Image: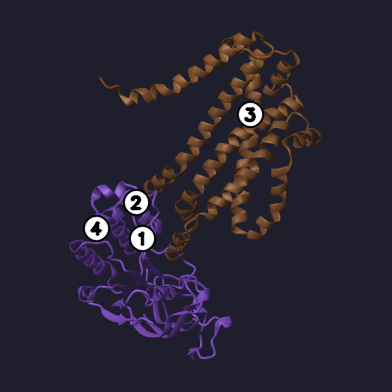
Amino acid sequence: MKQNPHNFSAWRRPLIILFWIFIWQLAAWLIHNNIILVGPADAGLALLRLIPTGGFWLSVAHSFVKISLGFLLAFACGLALGGAAYRFPLLKEFLAPILSLLKSIPVASFVILALIWVGSRNLAVFIAFLVVFPMIYVNTIAGLQSTDPKLLEMAQIFRVPAFKKFRYIYLPALLPYLLSGCKVALGMSWKSGVAAEVIGIPDASVGERLYMSKIYLDTANLFAWTFVIIVISALFERAFLALLGGLQRKGGVAHEADRPQSA
Amino acid sequence: MKLTVRSLRKSFGDLQVLNGINLEMESGRVYCLMGPSGSGKTTLIRVLMGLETADCGDIIWENMVSALPATDTATSDSLSSDSAVSDSVALDSAASDSMASDSAVSDSAASLPVANDKAGKGNNPTGISPRFAAVFQEDRLCEAFTPVENVMLVTDRSLSAARVRAELSRLLPEESLSRPVSTLSGGMKRRTAICRALLTPYDVLFMDEPFTGLDEDTRQTVISYILEKNAGRMLLISTHQEEDVASLGAEMIRLSSH
């Protein structure tokens, strides 16, 4: 009897993950040193010990708020300035050196500067902003530039108002670029934000917890916190991308529903 | 309203596309623009709409009865009873830097470069300009949106979604009206583009090969719909089919190849 190929593909991914977890556990058994490498079982136990504590949730909330705030501010500014730079090429030229600088300066240099300028309290906001802003800005310009000029000509002839032009012509062109930019930027904001916290050690942050794990050579806690960062980052990414992805169709339906239904 | 085109020339680099075009058109009449491929039909339409700058020549709109002042984009119906009337508007297509020495220049008092007239809206001294609608050679639809949404993109708020749906259902199957345009056939997209042009307020309608991809029955249905909706306004259709001239009751304007 033939095996259903759909059943196999459904199980393939979990099986592959299980395989690598087994390899990880095997390596931990072979090395047999909890400072160098802990296995998934020990990391899981460390996580279970962390979850019921108030400090865990406080640290998660602190880092989530700061890094998300930095991301959202960068998203808003990148979108606004990218749109303005598309409209006014002189502004794009004017901002080009700043963008090159932001993209090439190492995050560690920014972190040290930020510690001097804004202190450790809002360090993650600042660093997440600096890392995300160039990505959103560049993708906004690229998305707007990819707008079909033939559709813009059509809008010109039919005298389509600016708001409708944005919703029906610019937004569908912009969204794929924005989505792809956000996919990278969301992950980068968490990586750079937590790295900044490890250097700046703000109170009650995930970065501080990672730093403590390093000080006490507590590899199990390090793995547990790393897992937490991955989960929060993935959840935030999924929620934000779902919101962006739903924007285009929602806009179109709302437009039709806005109109009076009588002929 | 009357349109007079005199000695219109347009070239792209060394390629002379329009070579001294002269024509006259009036509101309430249908004109079929015919000619072999490459004879400049699309270029002429684009120049008349203001999407291309002519090298020289005149485009003159006279006795204009327009739906709205040039600055107003929200009109409910073209040719409304309170419409403004201007005596004569002359749009001289010879931009200052491209005025050829051998060009035929209009002696009209009010002359403006066509390039500055954004789709008939712009530096018009009377404050009135013809409002255009178009069916382009390509459909130029927003692919992610439904036919209803595509039409409502260009219509004003006085036209309800139900009315747009009813009009579209005269040309398209009902079930296609709620699907994204990207999922429709070529013929359905064409009919959506035609409906979009006819339901927007306009004074002059340009259609560039609108019947491409339509079978004979659909073609006749579409022609009837065009004639019904266009009533009283100026219509210029470019086509390769001689029988369209008779079906539309149109006057023929023939462009020769170069």
Nearer to the camera, B102 or B36: B36
Q: Earlier in the sequence, mark 2 or mark 1?
A: 1
Residue located at (39% from left, 76% from top): B40
Discs 4, 2: same chain: yes
Residues indicated by labels 3 and 2 sit on the same polypeptide chain: no
Residue at 34% x, 57% y: name it.
Answer: B159
Determine crowd level at label 1: few under 14, some 14-19, many 20+ residues with C-alpha closer than 10 A. Answer: many
Co-location on one chain, circles 1 and 4: yes
Of the chain colours in the picture, the one used for chain B is: purple
Q: Secondary structure at mark 3?
A: helix
Q: Where in the figure is residue A169, as x and y percent of width and height? A: 46, 54
Q: Residue at x 56, y 39 (%)?
A: A182
Report the amino acid beneath label 2: Val
Res A181 → quadrant: top right
Question: Given contact means CB atoms under 8 Å apart, are the residues at marks 2 and 1 in contact?
Answer: yes
Disc 1 versus disc 4: nearer the observer: 1
> What label does residue A65 carry, if any?
3
Identity, as a three-letter code, of the amino acid under mark 3: Val
Chain A colour as displayed:
brown
- The residue singled out by tag 4 in the image is B171
Q: Which residue is the site of mark 2?
A: B181
Whether B66 is drawn above or below A111: the answer is below
Label disc, if present, on residue B139 of the rendered structure: 1
Q: Secondary structure at mark 2?
A: helix
